[in-house]
Image: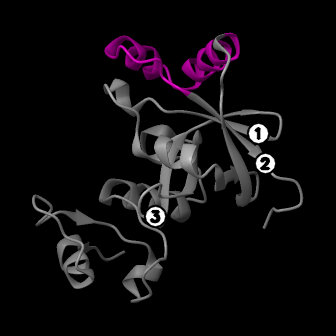
Amino acid sequence: MPQLQLDRVLSALGKLGPGHQGRTVLLPPSVRRGRFPAVKASPFNQKTIAEFHEKRGRGVGMWGDNLLLLTARGARSGELITTPLVCGQEGDNYIVVASKGGAPKHPTWFGNIKANPDVEVEVVTDGGTEKFKARARVVETRVERDRLYTEMIRIWPSFADYEKRTDRLIPVVILERRSGLSR
């Protein structure tokens, strides 16, 4: 599968910022064929998204099968932005954590879902992947948040370390499937 120089692609789009020259990223087939996606993602996320689709959600990078793709509208830009996230599941809903690796500030996607909670989620299924509409709900009660965070540590043990690296309470978000809107 050919790789493209990201700086050439982004320069053509006028979106290349300083410090990004020379980075190589594996782009999805639609981009390589000249049809640019309507959804934005960082170079690292773009590569992870491509791998997610290539492997039909299975065995993606270091995350294995515990990954979903969250597409949310940017709070400031209004553009659709896709972010791969480690996930858990509770019933029909999916659980994600706004850890940003224990950084002092919340990840950008968290601000996006707070401003625009109607999102699209793509998850791994037995037969491949499934996309569905969801509503992102930030867990408000400390008891529910702590219970779900503990469950997420079982899936991704690094979440325990992330919590120790920051003074902020790391939010937990439930992606509630919206009935009748699957595709």
| Location of residue 61 with respect to 48 vertically, above or below | above
Give the Cα separation between the discs numbered 3 and 2.
Answer: 24 Å
User: How many numbered callouts?
Assistant: 3
Q: Residue at x 10, y 61 (%)?
A: 18
- Tag of residue 93: 1
Query: From which residue to which does the magenta span run?
Result: 143-171
Please state if 19 lies on the left or on the right of 85 as rendered. Answer: left
Give the Cα separation between the discs numbered 1 and 3.
Answer: 24 Å
Q: Residue 97: which quarter of the image?
A: top right
Marked residue nearer the N-terminal end (1 or 2): 1
65 or 136: nearer the viewer: 136
Residue beneath disc 2: 177
Please state if 149 lies on the left or on the right of 50 as rendered. Answer: right
Marked residue nearer the N-terminal end (3 or 2): 3
Q: Is residue 157 magenta?
A: yes
Magenta stretch, overall SS: helix
Marked residue nearer the N-terminal end (1 or 3): 3
Kindly state the secondary structure of the residue where label 1 is placed: strand
Q: Is residue 133 magenta?
A: no
Contact between marks 1 and 2 (CB within 8 A): the answer is yes
Q: Residue at x 64, y 55 (%)?
A: 119
